[in-house]
Amino acid sequence: MIRSFIALEVTDETILNHIKKIQEELGRAQARLKLVEPQNLHFTLHFLGNVESARIPDVKEILQELEFPAFDIELSGLRCFRPARLRVVWVGVTKGADECIRLQQLIGQHLRERRFPVEGRKYSPHLTVARVRRGANRSQLSPVLDILEQYANHEFGVTRIKEVKLKKSTLTPRGPIYEDLEVRELS
């Protein structure tokens, strides 16, 4: 079995440096956060979970048959899904969100046709930058909420999305290690 997902990566150094500075600020908040390593920042389109290795070529084929143009995304705003139960801190997408959603839906359609399980909930493109570790209490998270408010409208920049990737995820005690299994350039 291979734990895998389909994703878009952000490789723009300027954007990554902006995110890294905010992650450093989050780290200083001492709020029991696990910061996502810069090399692991990505937009998950589909989390496939544990896939039999014999089925990986089917996913690769879906990506190789994919017809979708490259597009720009603008990253803006530091957010979380539910402030009352803060679990994930992420950067949002303004420009390019519709393209991310269409690409996610297109790939999902092909996955369903090949009988891969696909999540049914509405897709919201976001770039996870930190996760709250278990055992963090509300008072520890107060500084994080302040940082979220401070950067709610922060503009991280615009970058071109030129590839979609099938990634392997190996879980380790120090965090996940990602490996490209397939890279499909967008037209």
Image: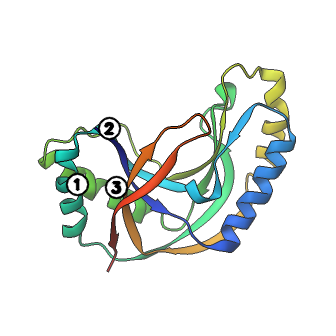
Amino acid under disc 2 = Glu
Give the camera-side residue of 136 and 170.
170
Q: Residue at x 34, y 55 (%)?
A: 104
* Label 3 Cα neighbours within 10 Å, binned few <14 / some 14-19 / many ≥20: some
Q: Earlier in the sequence, mark 2 or mark 3?
A: 3
Q: Residue at x 82, y 26 (%)?
A: 140
In the rendered structure, the answer to whether residue 69 lies left or right of residue 130 reads left
In the rendered structure, the answer to whether residue 60 lies left or right of residue 36 reads left
Estimate the x, y position of residue 50 in percent, counting from the top left: 31, 37
Residue 174, above or below 141: below
User: What residue is pinned by disc 1?
Assistant: 59
Q: Quadrant of residue 139?
A: top right
Which of the labelled discs sits on residue 184, or is there none? none
Amino acid under disc 3 = Gln
Amino acid under disc 1 = Val
Foreground disc of the pair 3, 1: 1
* Label 1 Cα neighbours within 10 Å, binned few <14 / some 14-19 / many ≥20: many
User: What residue is pinned by disc 2?
Assistant: 119
Q: Earlier in the sequence, mark 3 or mark 1?
A: 1
Q: Secondary structure at mark 1?
A: helix
Q: Earlier in the sequence, mark 2 or mark 1?
A: 1
Estimate the x, y position of residue 171 in percent, counting from the top left: 49, 38
Q: Residue at x 61, y 63 (%)?
A: 75
**Viewer can see residue 172:** yes
Residue 77, above or below 186: above
User: What residue is pinned by disc 3?
Assistant: 104
Give the CA distance from mark 2 to mark 3: 11 Å
Q: Secondary structure at mark 3?
A: helix
Mark 3 and mark 1 residues within 8 Å of each other at the beta carbon: no
